[in-house]
Image: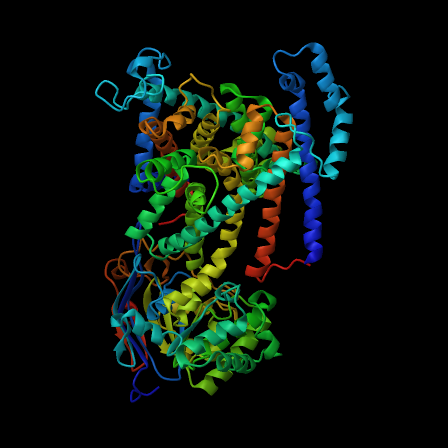
Amino acid sequence: MSSQTKPLLSITDLKTCFHTLDGVVNAVDDIQFDVYPGETLGLVGESGCGKSVTALSVLRLLRCPPAEITGKICFENRNLLELNSEEMRNIRGKDISMIFQEPMTSLNPVLTIGEQIAEAARNHKRMTRQEAWRWAVEMLRMVQIPGPNTRARDYPHRLSGGMRQRAVIAMALSCNPKLIMADEPTTALDVTIQAQIMNLMVHLKEEFKTAIVLITHNLGIIAEMASRVIVMYAGKIVEEAPIQELFKDPRHPYTKGLLGSIPVIGRKDKTGRYLQEIPGIVPSPLDMPVGCRFNPRCPKVMDRCKKEEPPMVRQGEHRRVLCWLEA
Amino acid sequence: MLHYVAKRLLFTIPVLIGISLLLFFMLRMLPGDPAQVLAGQMATPEEIQTIRQQLGLDRPIHIQYASFLGRLARLDLGLSARTQNPVIQEIWARLPNTILLAMTAISLACLFGIPAGILSAVRPYSWIDYIVTIAALFGISMPVFWLGLMLVVVFSVILKWLPAGGTGGWQHVILPSITLASFVVAFIARMTRATMLEALSQDYTTTARSKGLTEKTIIIKHALRNALIPIITVVGLQFGLLLGGAVLTETVFAWPGLGRLIVDSILARDYSMIQGTILIFGLLYTLVNLAVDLIYAFVDPRIRYD
Amino acid sequence: MNKKGLKDQDNRFRRIWVKLNRNKTALFGSTLIVIYFLSALLAPVLYPGSPSAPNLIRSLEPPSLEHPLGTDELGRTILGRIIHGSRVSLVIAVGVIMVGLLIGVPLGLISGYYGGKIDFGIQRVTDMLLAFPGFLLALALVAVLGVGLKNTITSIGISMVPIYIRLVRGCVLAIREETYVEAARAVGTRDAAILFRHILPNVMVPITVQTSLGMGTAILFAAGLGFLGIGVQPPTPEWGAMLGSARAYIFNAPHVATFPGIAIFLAVLSFNLLGDGLRDALDPRFKI
């Protein structure tokens, strides 16, 4: 992406916290990033790092309270956090839509697949019932569901996991949105089905010219689909880089650890193992380490890391690292 | 579907036989001689003996039960010791009154309970939620017979708007059905609140919201359709409570239904009548449960009875 | 490790306490229960003399200084009868819960733990009893057993048994498959020890909640039977029976029917409030 294009979505100083009985949990802590039209941005991290909360914050799908979202989420020059609920409703599904992880639970069990796709179209495109239904069948054909006419009349429990996720994708695409937040779209599926769904998404993305924020913990999927990657750890963005550069030259020790934990056949590390692990566990959000949040697990930890929060170091237009080593 | 209904109906037979067996033996093994009661305090031993023979009480108990079952199959529940009329005839005469009362009450309860529960769940911890929650708790804790008496005091004694009891026009139905509904409406409101809260926190609700649907559509089309399944179960179960409440309500309002009949029979030790009414109550309850299971199939596409 | 376990435990109790405290209604319920217990225990002190001795000259008097809640049809002071009535209802409620717990819990444990034929047998009988909704079952049992205090307790108690059986069996089925129970069995712990040391503590939470709610139900049912004239018999000051006889005077002396009903209502309400509060506090699924 060149700097001439204006970002579609621009997030600045986003903080999302939850007020719980045990205290305030900062699930997303002061992050910023841009998404450009038509690109695929990968958002990677372990579970609990705040990547799903980021997506839900963008669409304002968190119940407030207990959640509290501050900062700026600008979509086409409008700060989503300042819109009223009616204006927000007109953005959801129409301009920005979402694909959820669990196709089992994200579809309503008592409504037909066709109805669930058609209702979004009816809602945003002012179609009649029949038009919307035909559109839904058309969408099912687009996501390569065989026999879309009969499938549209089926209830979710009659479809396999892969089919259901296709239906969810059809639902997300049904109003031709400019941006899709895809939260672990293939995690719940079998590996063979995963590949099919990923191919379908690549294909549809080209066709619909939709930007995608792909949230996953699977670096393999990121490598295949994304052009840029953001790595999150414990609510913070720790590294951002174009995809090739990230794999060739990871700079944050956490990113290095993540890449090391993908087994590569024939490549062993110094100790002769195929797989490297990151020692330790993700810190509790209620009990964050002082200084750099990664310091208890970092192999290159310095004294400074335990006292001061590291700065965000910009390295060129699309690279940044949150680490004292790069400062 | 028909096959399933037939199967379920067949299954109710052993349950009813079991109930009748329990009742039959317990009633006869306990102290107190029905023949004595029937003949009255002044009766001579000969008179009592005659009555015993008439009722077949002198024969061995298993023979008595066998003949009871035989008569049951022909819908013959014996003669009432109190009125000397056939039991089935008395029950038949009173059944419509109880059903009218129960149906009015359950409709009232759904009409008020479900919307109250939805409002409560949509705005949890708001003032409306507090009012509904507290009102529901009051409803559950309130003795129905007392509520009935208080309604009589207010609407019949003080305001003189409605009759205090008996049957007649539609005015007679109002107080008893409100009384009977009070308990059930509270249960339904609580259950609706709980299931709606659950449904509103499900992933599919988030999906619906992410599609930009209106709150109204999300609540009614997406959440309520799912919440309705457990609500129907509760309404079915409440029907049993309603039958229990009917006994009390009918007593308060001198409503000539099955509930009043059972109490009068217990007080008069009218064994055939007790047996008959309890069996009918059991049958009614079982049939309602069957109806509930069948309604499921219409609400929940995942359930198929083949 | 051990220290961490202890900390978790502390945390759990703190959470329960915070939630109970936060739940003001539950606290209100507990206060009412304390008043109810005190009134039952101290009845002879609070109202000395027989609550059942008639004084026909003073019958059906409205509330006054001497008789704060008025008098009934036999001129007995209603406040005194309500205070003594709390004693009767407490005896019934405790008795009913004892019957329900002592029969229901062991049967539920056995049914859930052993399964097989025993389970099948117990479940069929439970089904049969549950074919009758609570109050009707108690009513049917009274029809068989006859009226009076003891039979009221037995009837309502038995009508609660299937509820406890179902509850305990359900919990046991879930817990039986847990690793720690498997482990205890693997090292050869006796069944009885497993049941009482491992499984029973885990079903205590639902039993506690059910018991609080059950106390309320027992009071309500007993009052219902008393009202119908087939429960505790007059002149014993039983709240339901008081209402039953007050019914005849509803046109000229409505206060006679008003106050015993309020007593029943408050007693039942208090146990329901506490039960709901306990469920909210103890149920781990109920997060804030």
Tag count in the figure?
A: 0
Percent across and percent down for residue C182 are: 59, 40
Residue nearest the observer in this picture, B130 or B62: B62
Compared to residue A248, the image places residue B244 above or below, namely above
State the quadrant of the C terminus of chain B. Answer: bottom right
Q: Is residue A322 left or right of residue A165?
A: left
Residue lying furthest left: C65
Question: Is residue C116 visible to the viewer in this orientation of the structure?
Answer: no
State the quadrant of the N terminus of chain B. Answer: bottom right
Percent across and percent down for residue C245 are: 41, 24
Compared to residue B136, the image places residue B83 above or below, namely above
Percent across and percent down for residue A38 are: 39, 84
Residue nearest the observer in this picture, B237 or C111: B237
Q: Is residue B36 left or right of residue C4?
A: right
Q: Residue at x 62, y 11 (%)?
A: B42
Q: Residue at x 30, y 58 (%)?
A: A65
Place residue A57 in its image quadrant. Answer: bottom left
Which color scheme is applied? rainbow
Percent across and percent down for residue C136 are: 55, 34
Question: Is residue C240 visible to the viewer in this orientation of the structure?
Answer: yes
Residue nearest the observer in this picture, C115 or C239: C239
Residue lying furthest bottom: A4
Residue lying furthest front: B168
Q: Residue at x 43, y 79 (%)?
A: A226
